[in-house]
Image: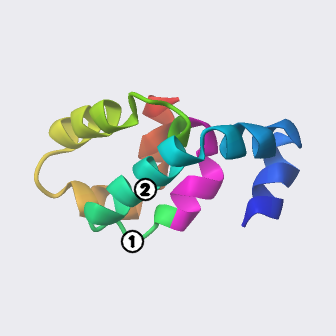
């Protein structure tokens, strides 16, 4: 997975991930706790948002906008995360 990310974002992203691994893991686990199945795909496609310390607030706001069926909406269209970039 990391090789795909490096291929897309360049070598510098690896350093950013390693320097911020606690934040990245916390944000990754947060999405898993929300029962979102496509976490790996979202992670690879939107790695830069996982580096954001305000990630949880942004995701919670997104969820609030999507409504109670947010999981289905996210699974149907992960490009919803474009709004967090």
Q: Position of residue 23 (x, y in %)?
A: 49, 42
Q: Is residue 14 above or below residue 84?
A: below
Helix, strand or loop under label 2: loop
Q: Position of residue 82 (x, y in %)?
A: 50, 36
Badge nearest the viewer, 1 or 2: 1
Q: Position of residue 10 (x, y in %)?
A: 87, 41
Q: What residue span does the magenta drawing correspond to?
A: 40-48
Q: Is residue 52 above or below residue 24?
A: above
- Residue drawn at 47 percent across, 63 percent down: 39
Q: Position of residue 76 (x, y in %)?
A: 38, 63
In the picture of the structure, the residue carrying the numbered disc 1 is 37
- Residue drawn at 13 percent across, 46 percent down: 67
Residue located farthest toward the left when viewing the structure as drawn: 68
Question: Which image quarter: residue 46?
Answer: top right
- Residue drawn at 19 percent across, 35 percent down: 65
Q: Are marks 1 and 2 in contact (CB under 8 Å)?
A: no
Q: How many marks?
A: 2
Dominant SS in magenta: helix
Mark closer to the chain start, 1 or 2: 1
Left or right: residue 49 versus residue 59 is right
In the picture of the structure, the residue carrying the numbered disc 2 is 77
């Amino acid at each position: 997975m990391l090789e795909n990310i490096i291929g897309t974002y360049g070598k510098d992203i690896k350093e950013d991930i390693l320097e911020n691994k606690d934040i990245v893991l916390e944000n990754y686990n947060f999405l898993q706790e929300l029962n979102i199945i496509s976490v790996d795909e979202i992670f690879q496609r939107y790695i830069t948002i996982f580096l954001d310390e305000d990630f949880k607030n942004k995701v919670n706001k997104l969820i609030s906008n999507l409504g109670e069926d947010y999981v289905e909406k996210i699974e149907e269209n992960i490009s919803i995360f474009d709004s967090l970039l």
